[in-house]
Amino acid sequence: MRVGLVSPYDFASPGGVNDHVRHLAVRLQKLGHETRIFAPSSRAEVDFNSARFYRIGRPIAIPVNDSVARITLSFHLANQVAAIIADERFDVLHFHEPLMPALPMTMLRMSTTANVGTFHAFAHSNVGYYYGRPLLQPYLGHLHRAIAVSEPARTFVNRYFPDFPMRVIPNGVDLNVYRPGLPPIRHLRDDNFNILFVGRLEKRKGLGDLLRAYHSIIERVPRSRLIIVGDGPLRGRVEAYVARHRLPNVVMAGYVPETVKPRYYDSADIFCAPATGAESFGIVLLEALASGLPVVATEVPGYMSVLEPGRDSITVQPKNWRELAASLVILARDHDLRTRLADYAQEKARRYSWDLIAGEVVEVYKEARKALAAQPARALEVSGVHHAV
Amino acid sequence: MGEWTWRAFKIVQSLVERLPRPWAYALAVLAAKFAWWFSPLARPRLEYNLKVACPELEKDPPALRKLSWLNFRNHAKAYADLMQLPSAHVESMRPLLKIKGLEHLDEARAFGKGVLVVSCHMGSYEVVSAIWSATLAPVSFFAEELEPRALYEWYRDTRARLGISVLTLDHGGIRRVLEALHEQEMVITAIDRDITGTGYLMPFFGKLAPIPLGPAAIALRLGTPLFPVCVYRLPDDTYMAEGAPLVYAKSTGNARADQVSATEQLLRNIERFIQQHPEQWHVPHRIWAGSP
């Protein structure tokens, strides 16, 4: 099959959706399918084969859902997209966040092939979905099949579009990339006890709670070290907090390339994910589990769709740094518990192997093609495309 | 360097990190001009070292002045590169690197005992190491611990995010170097300066200087090939990593003589690198007796 994967987000910036798209493209290619990626990008060079990547539009940063979405809002995409679609003749176009302007919506309106949508997001409410329902409903009608990455993500979409059918297929993890036994970052693999955080430095990731928790456990867990992997708008505030409280042994790694990130997991003893809310899944949890790390995480719906408290993790209430600190201390002091959680984590991660996940996605593609064959899509004239968004 | 100097460094670094690369270089060249004019010791020492490396400069003071200025300038640009590393992306760096002698690196890696890259204080090593770490094998720097601690930690963490481990020149560091080489990683070190004060006196540019024998000793112990490399900046501000044929340390039963023999072979390569690019070899420190 020829598959086009469409991401609305800046492909040069790290993020869960783009990671998903990148891995899915590679895995589909290995399964014998021809893949292309469409996304806006703030840089010409991206961490993907340039021959199979179409850079469509320049992204701008828009605050959304306690985070920042880097999407393109260009109104001049249509001609470029129409030419590519006509040229590539895709069997399936797979839209990630299909209701996100402007790229997925533009392409969805123009597509005459089998369309599949994957919904990644979760939030307690969405003003855009609420007020935009009449406008967005026709776009959903263009999708032949839809996927949600987790039960919370499905519930979120169904709250605004109640009868819209979706199949839950989780995110995957590359077990060849994330695994124990990789070369660690050697100077981090000393006699310190390493607590790892991976994520964008923004409010909803809960790093503030982790810093407070770390501050309170320093004396109880001697030689502990907090490694913060990720960058974002709160970096200055995090650095200021560390300096103000003179927190020892805090490593601000910043943005770490994908090729290096697995080595940080293999340099850690515990993984901590203290998000405060709007997480639909948590790919970082899968990466930690696959790397054989015990997890301390907050009980947000997205995380709870992945974790099994007591078997692979200890979970605590969101925004409760005291509970977070207590859990970190328990896990730091109990080597047997860490080993037990880590063993189960590794075994469990196999369920999320990209090989299995990509196979499930291909099944959905086939269903979408059957649906298209049963009811051929209406061809859209290119002249009408200029006003698609 | 004390607490306040570290803070000043961090402020400048935060500024440089946010600047476009040409602007960062412009600022660096300005700072280099200031340092070149007003450094009480660094410039005389550097010029002394350059005169030893390139004796023809002894009789040509204007050429020496020009060379030492270019040297400061290139070093400042390397500093700007370093300050921009926290937000640098390997994908963006990759087109900036050209490599000569990659076949020697392939040969060393095929040997299956890790690679000990031996070099001198020249060029932007982080750029090359980050790319090699992302594409070939994990890289470790075997280097001195800087003062103050905060600055050292910044260096270490900045390099680590690009996959470069930083191992100190002590027993713990040596143990980790051995581990890294056992696991077929690359370890990069420099031998043009004796930092620990335990070097062995041997001719360097024809004059006796203390030279560390550590890399040769490790190579003898593990059978790891030694790969002489230099990194320098090209006129268009891209980088060239140039490798020479491998040096294999051979054991004859006399450990010290074997170490010296392998190190001499390395030094001949290092001397050649420096003589080809003296404007990029930045060591404003005492190497030889008689230096200011």
Image: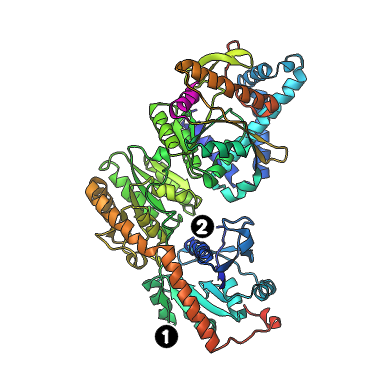
- Where residue A111 sits, quadrant-wise, is bottom right
Q: Is residue B76 above or below residue B49?
A: below
Provide the residue designation for mark 1.
A163
Question: Number of callouts in the render?
Answer: 2
Compare residues A36 and A293 and report the one nearer the observer: A36
Going 59% across and 36% down the picture, which residue do you hit? B104
Q: Is residue A262 left or right of residue B102?
A: left
Q: Residue at x 35, y 56 (%)?
A: A289
Question: Is A320 included in the stretch rendered in magenta?
Answer: no
Sequence-earlier tag: 1 or 2? 2
The quarter in which the N terminus of chain A is drawn is: bottom right
Q: Residues within 10 Å of mark 1 (few under 14, many from 20)?
A: few
Classify mark 2: residues with Cα within 10 Å, few (<14), some (14-19) or many (20+): some
Please state if A359 lies on the left or on the right of A218 as rendered.
right
Give how far across and how far down residue A368 sits, in percent: 50, 80
Q: Which mark is residue A347?
A: none
Q: Is residue A63 left or right of residue A312?
A: right
Please, what is the three-letter code of the amino acid marked with disc 1? Asp
Q: Please report, as a chain letter, where disc 1 is located.
A: A
- Decide if residue A136 is in sight here: no
Colouring mode (rainbow / by chain / secondary structure / one colour): rainbow
What stretch of residues is rendered in magenta?
A: B213-223
Describe the element under mark 2 as helix, strand or loop. Answer: loop
Q: Residue A329 or A243: which is nearer the viewer?
A: A329
Badges 1 and 2: C-beta atoms under 8 Å apart?
A: no
At x 35% / y 60%, what residue is drawn? A349
Q: Main secondary structure of the magenta part?
A: helix
What residue sits right under mark 2 in the picture?
A: A14
| Tag 2 subunit | A
- Indicate the position of residue B18 as horizontal and vertical percent values: 59, 47
For residue A280, what is the image quadrant?
Answer: bottom left
